[in-house]
Image (cartoon, rainbow, N blue to C red):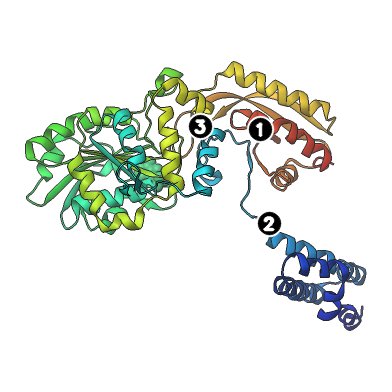
Amino acid sequence: MNKNLLYRRIPKVDVLLEDEKIRELTEQYSYDTVLEAVREELDKLRALIGTCEDEAEGIREIEQLSVRIQEAVKAMHTPNMRTVINGTGTILHTNLGRAPIGERHMRHIADIAMNYSNLEYNLEAGARGERYSHFEKLLCKITGAEAAMAVNNNAAAVMLILSTMGKGKEVIVSRGELVEIGGKFRIPDVMEQSGATLVEVGTTNKTHYTDYENAITEETAALLKVHTSNYRIVGFTDNVSIAELVPLGKEREIPVIEDLGSGVLIDLSKYGLTYEPTVQDSVRNGADVVCFSGDKLLGGPQAGIIVGKKKYIDQMKKNQLTRALRIDKFTAATLEVVLQEYLSEKKAIQNIPALRMITKEIEEITRDAQELEALLQQAELPAQIQMEPCESQIGGGSLPLERIPSMAVTIHPEKITTAELELRLRHMPVPMIVRTMNDKIVIDVRTVDKKWYPKIAKMLKEEEILE
Ligand SMILES: *Cc1c(COP(=O)(O)O)cnc(C)c1O
């Protein structure tokens, strides 16, 4: 084949810019972005012809050039971050954005975001206010703590606490609690960054009261307890509970800090889950400072919430680091409305999507699965579609061993492989992320809002996903 001939058939930049469709683009977007796309697509085409072994294919690609340019310009102006359907059954999926926010809450946040607000303005006094004021009282009321604040995420909260209370001094922590949380967040590394010196006590599986007692020196600034919410050591184990640690701290006048990780505010054992210590328990047991995530079991925005004794919270609010770690207006507004739901446990369960999904009863899930299955059957797709029991997970490093009985709609494609189907589902107009098991696609309906069911059926049919 004659590559030179192919290269010569490639239209020149100025010819392309005269193309009617491309001229329309320069009017709609800008001349510069279109020109950039033209150049990039031309480079790609030349590279493709360079490696192409098939003349007919080369010609086809040249003919497609204008379309490719149009697509590239449109893609540049279409958000890459978009809604996906979570069919994995993992409720707090870190890669999929952890806790979704409820629609009513989001409308309030949009209102705050689209206007000016009293974020840091005290309307009574007509003077500067505090961004924590919108949710501090609520947090105190719900948890029983004296004071509260929030930073960007719980990793930042741990950092701020240690920097404020332990910088240049020693903080004692059990070896069994030196955890790494997703995204390479390691407790020992964070401690180092904060300027506190880590003093490890005990062994991986056992730490005793006397281990803490013997490690206390003149230099000890705090005792730290980390709730190992993303893994469990089972078997021959022992650790010192916060209730046992607090009297030791009191006796030696050393504050006790607890990093709870998940930060659950409701006793989930009432809903059939394993008991997880609540923030209220930690405060009641006398921890001086407690921190936890806003977007794990709390079901709110990404945030690191710190509650505890006013003396320490005040010090943290004054720490220069706080300025770097501070939450924005979206988070402050979201925290307030989500926390308000916790004034009634019933409302929290109903109105916070993550909690609603976690506590949804199997009867309701089964009805949902029947509804989705029926819609997919009606679409007459070339696939075997069935309802099957499955298990959901909490995710987000919370309750790692927990499996919640759930119901799935499974799809076994007849014309394509299951792997191909999984890939195509990820490329639908609204991508759907699923698990595969036993050569079937598993859609756990626990994490799929009902509003998506007709859309899923429509996309599978109209986009010919199974053909
Ligand atoms: C998840 C977790 C963190 C980190 O929280 P982010 O909000 O993700 O920053 C810190 N400590 C513990 C124990 C955790 O489980």
Local crowd size for mark 1, using a 10 Å CA cut-off: few (<14), some (14–19), many (≥20)? many
Mark sitting on residue 354: 3
Three-letter amino acid code of the residue under disc 1: Ile
Residue 423 is situated, as x and y percent measured from the top left of the image, at 71, 47
Q: Quadrant of the C terminus?
A: top right
Q: Could you tell whether 186 is left or right of 309 in the image?
A: right
Q: Quadrant of ligand 1?
A: top left
Whole-angstrom CA distance, mark 2 to mark 3, is 28 Å
Three-letter amino acid code of the residue under disc 2: Thr
Asked if the residue at label 2 sits under 8 Å from ligand 1, the reply is no
For residue 444, which quarter of the picture?
top right
Q: Which residue is mark 1?
A: 443
What residue appears at the point 69 percent right and 28 percent down from the top-left corner? 409
What element does badge 1 sit on? Answer: strand
Mark sitting on residue 78: 2
Q: Nearer the viewer, residue 430 or 76?
A: 76
Residue 343 is situated, as x and y percent measured from the top left of the image, at 38, 25
Sequence order check: which comes first, mark 2 or mark 3? Answer: 2
What residue appears at the point 63 percent right and 44 percent down from the top-left corner? 83
What element does badge 2 sit on? Answer: loop
What residue appears at the point 21 percent right and 46 percent down from the top-left corner? 314
